[in-house]
Amino acid sequence: MEDKLFEMLTKMYSDMQEMKANMVTKQELQEGFHKTNQAITRLENKMDESHKALYDGYKQSIEGIHELRNQVDKLIDQVEHQEIKLQVIKGSK
């Protein structure tokens, strides 16, 4: 009986040593968290840069659209002015 108890204790001790070897230490966890935080920070920086680039592109597109609208408005005014001149010329003949 004592032999069986000793074998069981020996096996339990061996299993516990194996479990201990497989456990992650507090320092390893902290290093992992630190690396993860660095990766997240790099990702946030890349996203911020991409967001700024997209916003700049959007802003340029909107400015271009406004410029085109102004040019179209000027052309419409010129055409209307020409139509008025033609009506005046036709009316005076």
Image: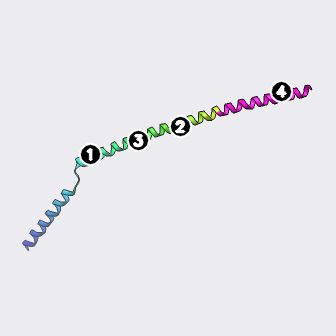
Crowding near the residue tagged with mark 3, few <14, some 14–19, many ≥20 C-alpha atoms within 10 Å = few
Kindly report the distance in space between the C-alpha atoms of the residues bearing marks 2 and 3.
Answer: 20 Å
What amino acid is found at the position of numbered circle 1 in the picture? Glu
What amino acid is found at the position of numbered circle 2 in the picture? Gly
Name the residue furthest left: 2
Mark 1 or mark 4: which comes first in sequence? 1
Kindly report the distance in space between the C-alpha atoms of the residues bearing marks 1 and 4.
Answer: 81 Å
Question: Which residue is nearer to you in this view: 10 or 60?
Answer: 60
Residue depicted at x 51% and y 39%: 54
Question: Which residue is nearer to you in this view: 47 or 32?
Answer: 47
Left or right of 1 on screen, residue 58? right
Which stretch is magenta? 68-93
The image shows residue 17 at horizontal and vertical percentages of: 16, 59
Q: Which residue is mark 3?
A: 44
The image shows residue 24 at horizontal and vertical percentages of: 23, 53
Left or right of 46 on screen, residue 81? right
Q: Nearer the viewer, mark 1 or mark 4?
A: 4
Crowding near the residue tagged with mark 4, few <14, some 14–19, many ≥20 C-alpha atoms within 10 Å = few
Kindly report the distance in space between the C-alpha atoms of the residues bearing marks 4 and 2.
Answer: 42 Å
Q: Which residue is mark 2?
A: 57
